[in-house]
Image (tube, helix red, strand yellow):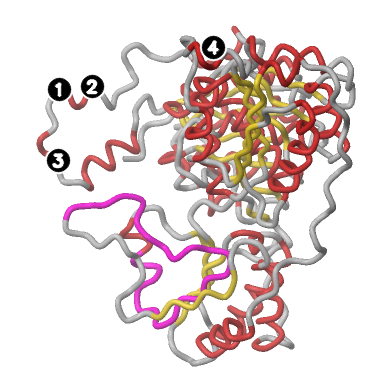
Amino acid sequence: MNGAQALIRTLVNAGVNVCFANPGTSEMHFVAALDAVPEMRGVLTLFEGVATGAADGFSRIAERPAAVLLHLGPGLGNGLANLHNARRAGTAVLTVVGDHATYHKRFDAPLESDIDALAGAVSGWVQRTERIQDVARDAAAAVAAAIGPPAEVVTLILPADVSWQLGASVAPAPTPPTPGPPLVRDEALSAAAAALGSGEPAVLLIGGDATRERGLCAAARISAATGAKLLCETFPTRLERGAGLPMVGRLGYLPEMATYQLGGAKHLVLAGARSPVTFFAYPGQPGDLVPATCRVHELMGPAGASAALERLAELLAMDIKAPLAELCRPRLPTGELTAQSAAEVIGALLPEAAIVVDESNTSGVFLNPATEGAPRHDWLALTGGAIGYGLPAATGAAIAAPERPVLCLQADGSAMYTISALWTHARENLNITTVIFNNRAYAILRLELRKVGVDGAMGPKAKALLDLSEPTIDFVALATGMGVPAARATTAEQLAEALRTALAEPGPHLIDAIVPPVV
């Protein structure tokens, strides 16, 4: 058995049976070994950022790691943005990077680079395997590190000669982590209970595993009992929402919105969430969003936040039931297609058990209110802020849950970063409906331009860098050229018709929704 076969067999034994790949010469023995281990599903992507984003989306839904196979430092570099998103999301991703043969590195070949340094920027665990005897051991350790807790991105660097050498063996699956989440500290529990029960204005901000049903119900009970405002992070990793679940507001992206939501609070209790800050620095504005007179109390980090909230609810809301959203959809709109009417169409037609991958950016401002009373669904958000996430994450989510419809809500500019994911949607016949919010502009940057105070200084050269209309991007042609059926919608009625058709038919679809910019 060679090193590549031992690596893949060890991964499969440990429950890692999907590998998103964009391989090169250094990984050919890994590719060949896939036929020797048929339990491993290899999924080809045409760009490394699609592979890494797909692994993130897979992990968010499957709650176990997928593998990613990348080629040397440049391949890892191409995948870094979505590994950054996975790191911020706290998802389990196992990255395997092929390297030059150990004896070839001294030649400083054209593709030689510092893979270890690149991997360290996004990985919580990095290991280079330089002996055939260590391949299986390191693979098992990588799985254990990825699963955690906490779950994280890990990188295993495999030189080509270690991959092709014979004499490797398979390692047993790593010992599962100790059952149960980390326990909340008694002093943190007492401080949070005192703050929320003080009668002073308070905000309960949740994230991590608290945005699932158990955590949401506990948080909603606490909010109902104490009057504390309940919010979740701006871009949660996975938010369960819809009819039958508590409704939770999301902290605003814009500093003005977040400042308004947190205004007047004397206590901020964090359960799985970080203390809120602005995404960027703005002239003359503070970066810390917590009011100056507000005390911050950290109840629990991302792992174990749900259990901590349940304990807190036992103290503060013993006899309180969580208020739950009722099924309530918008009426189907008619006429002009705008970001608002598009959101209403989506809210009216969103199917039961859907997985929504949201990278709609500025066009998505109306989506939350339009969908909060839709049938129960999962919402995956852009946790790390690195765009080009939506199409790849939808790929992984669809492979993790092939029985569920996936709806990818995608801004046009961000879509172009990883547009080749559509080819993988078609190749794997994935049940993904992509709606492109096509406003033909980098609208988010127009907004940021105003916020940093240079809007009035915009000349034709500056404006050209934020415009996507010359030439017009034909998403219908792009999609059909990669094997995905596509339609264009310019009215609310056309979007509804196209969405109904796409949701009724198996396999991938794309709808190019032409909407004016919101900003």
Q: Quadrant of the C terminus?
A: top left
Residue at 68%, 48% in the rendered image: 378
Q: Nearer the viewer, mark 4 or mark 3?
A: 3
- Where residue 316 sits in the image (x, y, percent)? 64, 88
Amino acid tagged 4: Leu
Which of the two labelled residues, at mark 1 and mark 4, occupies the earlier sequence position? Answer: 1
Which of the two labelled residues, at mark 4 and mark 2, occupies the earlier sequence position? Answer: 2
* Residue 270 within the magenta-colored segment of the rendering: yes
Residue 464, numbered label: 2
Label 4 vs label 2: CA separation?
Answer: 23 Å
Disc 1 marks which residue? 460
Disc 3 marks which residue? 454
In front of the other: 88 or 418: 88
Residue at 68%, 37% in the rendered image: 94
Magenta span: chief secondary structure: loop
Q: Is residue 507 left or right of residue 71?
A: right
In front of the other: 17 or 250: 17
Q: Please tell me how crowded label 1 is: few (under 14), some (14-19), or many (20+) other residues with Cα within 10 Å.
A: few
User: Mark 4–mark 3 contact, CB under 8 Å?
Assistant: no
Label 3 vs label 1: CA separation?
Answer: 14 Å
397 versus 420 height, above or below? below
